Image (cartoon, coloured by chain):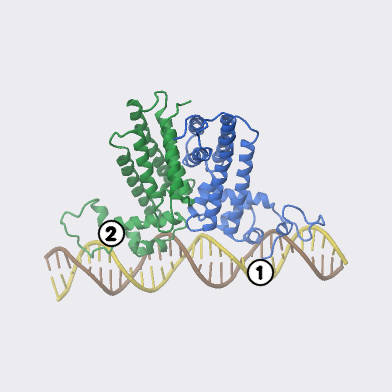
Chain colours: A green, B blue, C yellow, D brown
Amino acid sequence: MVQKSASQKWPGANPPSGKKRGRPRGYEPDAALTKARAAFWDAGYSATSLDALSAATGMNRPSLYGAFGDKRALYLKTLEGYRALGRAAIAEALGGDRPLRESLGRVYRSALAIYLSGEHGARGCFLIGTAAPEAIADKEVRDIYAAGLHELDDGFAVCFRRAQERGELAADVDPVERARLASAVLHTLSLRARAGEKREALERTAAQGIALLCGGASV
Amino acid sequence: MVQKSASQKWPGANPPSGKKRGRPRGYEPDAALTKARAAFWDAGYSATSLDALSAATGMNRPSLYGAFGDKRALYLKTLEGYRALGRAAIAEALGGDRPLRESLGRVYRSALAIYLSGEHGARGCFLIGTAAPEAIADKEVRDIYAAGLHELDDGFAVCFRRAQERGELAADVDPVERARLASAVLHTLSLRARAGEKREALERTAAQGIALLCGGASV
DNA sequence: GACTTTTTGTACCGTATCGCATAGAAATGA
DNA sequence: TCATTTCTATGCGATACGGTACAAAAAGTC
């Protein structure tokens, strides 16, 4: 039987007594997850060994195992964390009823900031870079991956619909389909960032994408 | 010292004598490469073991090693083969000076046929699915990956330029930038196919992309 | 201070993996 | 017939991998 850690017994909060009982952990779970995510991000799920994760997080393997479960469970947790991050970024960028061009620009800008960061070079989107390869063999990963893509689509869709209601966008445009093309621009930015394209080229493509997405009638 | 196989001594042809000297090989190199590529395609580079490659190709490990070198060399060969395939498909789809809409449609259609094939479900683009994850750690893979992306961009670019010369496309459109957005549609098709989206949804998105790419002015 | 609880650190286990060495098999040429 | 060449088959050895047992360590509790 696997011993559950204290953080799982009282999720998101300290135990009622306020003081935890045993030896204090020498790491911060959230920070460790972020480090683990960075390791997966660079090399992919399969190519990242437990030793690498151990080195990246500063935790030794038993601690890793106790805190997050086995390698796959840890990976799923990093995926979940990334999706939460992405959700927040989308909400932040698309909220506030801004003009369509500005909303799209904010999304692409904040995405590029993430895609271009990384110690060992630009890494692109974590979901696209690491979950996609595993998506055939691992159905759960595929579902999370697909959900991540569609979450972005949905965010863009409400954005386009609102713009249409404000008259910023032609009435015959299908906001759902247009949203999928807006995602396409983000997808290409992720792929190109990982291929090593320069920031200026990516920003130019984002700008061109915005221009196209905000104009043109459908069909 | 690594023994070179006969197929490397006389690339692309039989030896001058017409008859090879020793025991004939029990496999066809091209067919084996295709099988190996399929294995990498499903699971990714790192998650594909030599045993899996051996099972997929029907060759045992020493034969694999003798014919293609180690795992990485074999992977690079499958990459090269896929790029050749892609080049041919692009040339075939974009050649012939067809109307812009038709050219784009042919590219997307032939790409979808590849992306949706696969024994264990739709796999998307081989480059995007398998090379991208390795692109950070392996510079050579990254270069091949980037070259593959740019090859597509270039193909689209000449396509758009020709369409512009024929007056099918507004004169103020930058064909190079527009080509990168045409690639973006292909990128999203690859990512979405691997996520399990249905053919109809992908075809609809391709059609919407074509409509947008053929209209709209730049900036 | 002894006991309990929780985490850490070391060391280990069984297995999978990669690459290769070596021997055998199949075809040709002399 | 026999040597030569080339591929195939078995299987070995070193390493790396994922995962875990166990005892020491650090804190609270009585």
| x 43%, y 52%: residue | A123
In which quadrant will I find the C terminus of chain B?
Answer: top left
Quarter of the image where one finds residue A106: top left
x%, y% of residue B110? 59, 36
* Residue carrying label 1: B1
Q: Chain of mark 1?
A: B
Label 2 chain ID: A
Q: Mark 2 — residue?
A: A28
Q: Quadrant of the N terminus of chain B?
A: bottom right
Q: In this view of the protein, which residue sits in the foreground, B36 or A138?
A: B36
Q: Residue at x 36, y 48 (%)?
A: A82
Position of B93 relative to D16 (above/below): above
Amino acid at circle 1: Met
Q: What's the distance in space between the residues labelled 1 and 2, CA to CA?
A: 50 Å
Q: Residue at x 27, y 53 (%)?
A: A8
User: Does residue A207 lie above or below B143 as drawn?
Assistant: above
Apparent side of residue B3 relative to residue C6 in the rendered image (left or right): right
Comparing B42 with A189, the one in front is: A189
**Left or right of B99: which side holds B182?**
left
- The x, y position of residue B123, in whole percent, is 52, 43
Is C10 in front, or is B105?
A: B105
Q: Amino acid at mark 2?
A: Glu
